[in-house]
């Protein structure tokens, strides 16, 4: 047994004071769909609905055991790390200050307060996370409170590795030859699990699922060194990290860029909707990354294999559901947006409506501007029940002489108008 695995074992034992092992569930629906044996490691079922509690708890546990942390703790987060941090502060009866951007949804503020109780204070600073993080760092220096990082620390990685410790006890010999799909943001979870199973000499294949709009691990592996992305798509907010952590990358740099699957954000939305409708499982975007990565494997490639997908979190704000459904429909090809050159004459709208089929529905109709004296530009959203209906519609539009442009996949125009 290595020093690392021994420490992870101690962390796992200490965690039992907070919650039992999270379930490892064989999922019949995904297994039948893929032809493989699909197991879900349900980190969305911790007390804070994410794995982040593990790392924050382990960090504080070791600091307190060494006689430090008497001045309290501080973190900067608007998401799962804040909630795990708050829960740990309450457990240890230590004061903690959470810095969040002013733009943080009230739901996340309220949940963090709930988990931390009287031991937590929340400070809203700045419009962007960078401002918030800077304020937290300044506070830590002046107050002597200890900063608890979200992923870039060996004790955080050690805490997240307790997921792998549980996998060994839950699946045993069946882990040999299995594929483990790990979501990646800052890299703490991926580094911890992959390192533990490797040091336990368990023959597993690792696949890393990363948002296509925030491929910090993939870019770093391709370059051979940590790369900071100039910009990221923040939709997968639990994993939208511009730069992989320094400590996690020390472990993950042994892997190949081909081990990373870049998950399209709109496709991810379809997976979230599918899991909600079919399985009744509520997932946040980052929590669905590993499940969505199954779509990148052919049935022939994984038939009969054992695959473990780590479900990292279920803190989903249902106010985001309309956007998730919209993105899902667009990915599935069931909803499109067009700009039409609409004639300014009586009966024009009726002529247009007559071209629609019984399964086609207009979900948006908005005049943008009057392009000329006799024509106007109109934004029209159309939703249908079968993606093949759009081929029929285009043919009808062309035959009727309508001028139009499909802007569904034009990111620049769509972001401005839709």
Image (tube, rainbow, N blue to C red):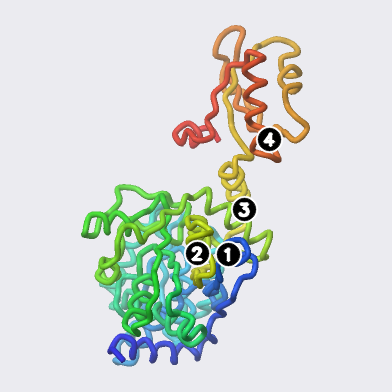
Q: Quadrant of residue 26?
A: bottom right
- Give the crowd class for mark 3: few <14, some 14-19, many >=20 residues within 10 Å: some
Seen in the image, is 78 located left or right of residue 406?
Answer: left
Mark toward the start of the polypeptide (3 vs 1): 1
In the rendered structure, find residue 125 and report the number of the disc placed on it.
Answer: none
Q: Which mark is residue 363?
A: 4
List the residue tagged with mark 3. 321
Residue 95 seen in the figure: no
x 35%, y 81%: residue: 196
The Cα–Cα distance between marks 4 and 1, rounded to whole angstroms, is 37 Å
Q: Position of residue 103 (x, y in %)?
A: 47, 54
- Quadrant occupied by the C terminus: top right
Dot 2 corresponds to which residue?
A: 302
Tell me the distance, in whole angstroms, between the alpha carbons under discs 2 and 1.
7 Å
Rendered residue at 53%/54% (across/down): 268
Q: Position of residue 318 (x, y in %)?
A: 62, 57
């Amino acid at each position: 047994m290595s020093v690392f695995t021994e420490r992870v074992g101690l962390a796992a034992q200490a965690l039992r004071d907070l919650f039992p092992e999270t379930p490892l569930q064989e999922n019949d629906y995904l297994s039948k769909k893929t032809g493989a044996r699909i197991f879900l490691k349900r980190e969305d079922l911790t007390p804070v609905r994410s794995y982040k509690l593990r790392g924050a708890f382990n960090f504080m546990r070791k600091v307190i055991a060494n006689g430090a942390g008497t001045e309290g703790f501080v973190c900067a987060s608007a998401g799962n790390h804040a909630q795990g941090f708050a829960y740990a502060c309450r457990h240890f009866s230590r004061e903690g200050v959470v810095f969040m951007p002013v733009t943080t949804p009230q739901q996340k503020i309220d949940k963090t307060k709930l988990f931390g109780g009287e031991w937590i204070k929340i400070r809203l600073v700045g419009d962007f996370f960078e401002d918030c993080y800077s304020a937290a760092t300044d506070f830590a220096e002046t107050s002597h409170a200890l900063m608890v990082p979200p992923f870039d620390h060996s004790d955080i990685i050690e805490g997240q590795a307790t997921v792998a410790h549980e996998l060994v006890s839950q699946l045993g010999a069946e882990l040999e030859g299995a594929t483990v799909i790990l979501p990646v943001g800052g890299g703490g979870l991926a580094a911890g699990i992959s390192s533990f199973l490797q040091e336990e000499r368990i023959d597993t294949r690792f696949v890393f699922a990363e948002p296509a709009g925030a491929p910090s691990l993939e870019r770093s592996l391709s370059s051979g060194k940590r790369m900071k992305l100039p910009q990221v798509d923040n939709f997968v907010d639990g994993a939208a990290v511009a730069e992989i952590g320094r400590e996690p990358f020390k472990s993950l740099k042994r892997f190949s860029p081909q081990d990373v699957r870049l998950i399209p954000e709109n496709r991810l939305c379809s997976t979230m909707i599918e899991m909600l409708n079919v399985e009744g499982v509520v997932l946040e975007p980052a929590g669905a990354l590993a499940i969505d990565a199954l779509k990148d494997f052919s049935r022939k490639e994984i038939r009969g294999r054992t695959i473990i997908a780590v479900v990292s979190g279920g803190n989903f704000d249902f106010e985001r559901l309309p956007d998730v459904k919209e993105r899902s429909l667009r990915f599935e090809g069931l909803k499109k947006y067009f700009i039409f050159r609409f004639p300014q004459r009586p009966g024009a709208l009726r002529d247009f409506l007559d071209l629609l089929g019984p399964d086609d529905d207009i979900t948006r109709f908005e005049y943008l501007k009057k392009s000329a004296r006799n024509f106007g530009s109109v934004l029209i959203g159309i939703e249908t029940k079968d993606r093949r209906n759009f081929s029929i519609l285009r043919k009808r539009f062309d035959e009727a002489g309508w001028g139009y442009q499909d802007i569904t996949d034009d990111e620049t125009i769509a972001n401005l108008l839709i």
